[in-house]
Amino acid sequence: MIFVIGNPMQQPQRKSLSRQVMESIEKLILEKDLKPGDVLPTETQISETLQVSKSSVREAVKMLEALGVVEIRRGLCTVISANPEQGYLNVMLSHLYLNSGNEEELQVFRRTVESAYTTLAIDTATEQDLAAIQASLAAFREKKRSGELTVDDDLAFHSQILQATHNSFMISLGGALNELFRETIGISIRYNPEIALEDHEKICAAILARDKDAAVAAIWESARQWATAFRLRGQDGNLVT
């Protein structure tokens, strides 16, 4: 059966084809109220329905897999993730990221969410959590020193802060947000690794001191630096992974 999802070619050309296809698959998930384990149309079916190449469909599905919306079962099929709450949350966030807001609005959105989960972590972090955050920062610092720093090291640091909230919804929201901004976070640390390390040091120090004002100030400065990656993104096709 071929689902009619809508032709992405009718959408604004500012988006890449794979992102347009991803949006169409998101609509399918939401409109059909697909449940965990439900099978998506095949790559061929989606390709024929949208009149796009299989490679564009494949890339779109990979993007959804990275967001936790679907699970690709190699050689078999693609199904809705076993965690529907996470999947639907990621669909909404990716829709927001791809369709709404300019650079300044995205910067405000990210720093607001990051400030919220970091200040919550200051209230809830145990000594074990604080040690894990420090260890993540130490790994970030060492990777930067050795020239092996990647976006995963940045996301790992923020993941430890999220875990320290002990709030499953906040962990899902923050994790999805960070994954959505993976590309620009990667560009930011590639061009400004020293500044990225300095920002992380300040955030970590504020958490250890349980100083919410200092944490928010450091996050806002970090978000300002990160925002430059939106301008750099169009100039550099080699992403940090």
Image: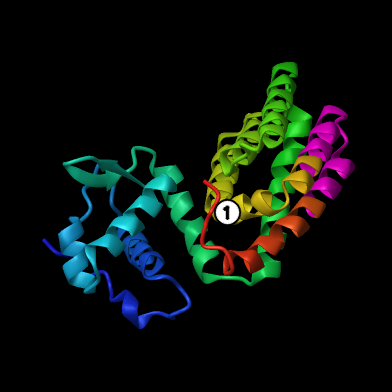
Answer above or below: position of 7 versus 121: below
Closest to the observer: 112 or 205?
205
Q: How far across and down, in percent of the image, does residue 91 sit?
A: 44, 56
Answer above or below: position of 122 versus 33: above
Closest to the observer: 20 or 186?
186
- Location of residue 187 by image quarter: bottom right
Q: Report the number of discs.
A: 1
Answer above or below: position of 57 versus 136: below
Residue under label 1, please give it: 181
Answer above or below: position of 14 versus 69: below
**Residue found at the far left of this picture:** 1
- Magenta-highlighted residues: 199-220
Amino acid tagged 1: Phe
Q: How far across and down, in percent of the image, does residue 8 sit?
A: 33, 75
Answer few, some or many: residues within 10 Å of disc 1's Cα (few below 14, many 20 plus, some between 14 and 19).
Answer: some
Q: Can residue 32 be seen in this view?
A: no
- Location of residue 162 by image quarter: top right
- Location of residue 196 by image quarter: top right
Tell whether 178 sits left or right of 228: left
Quadrant for the N terminus, please: bottom left
Q: Is residue 113 visible?
A: yes
Q: Could you tell me which secondary element the residue under label 1 belongs to?
A: loop
Dominant SS type (magenta) = helix
Tell whether 240 sits left or right of 28: right
Closest to the observer: 229 or 29?
229
206 is within the stretch colored magenta: yes
**Residue at 18% from the left image edge and 55% from the top image edge:** 42
Q: Which colour scheme is used?
A: rainbow
**Residue at 66% from the left image edge and 33% from the top image edge:** 143
Q: How far across and down, in percent of the image, does residue 199 sit?
A: 79, 44
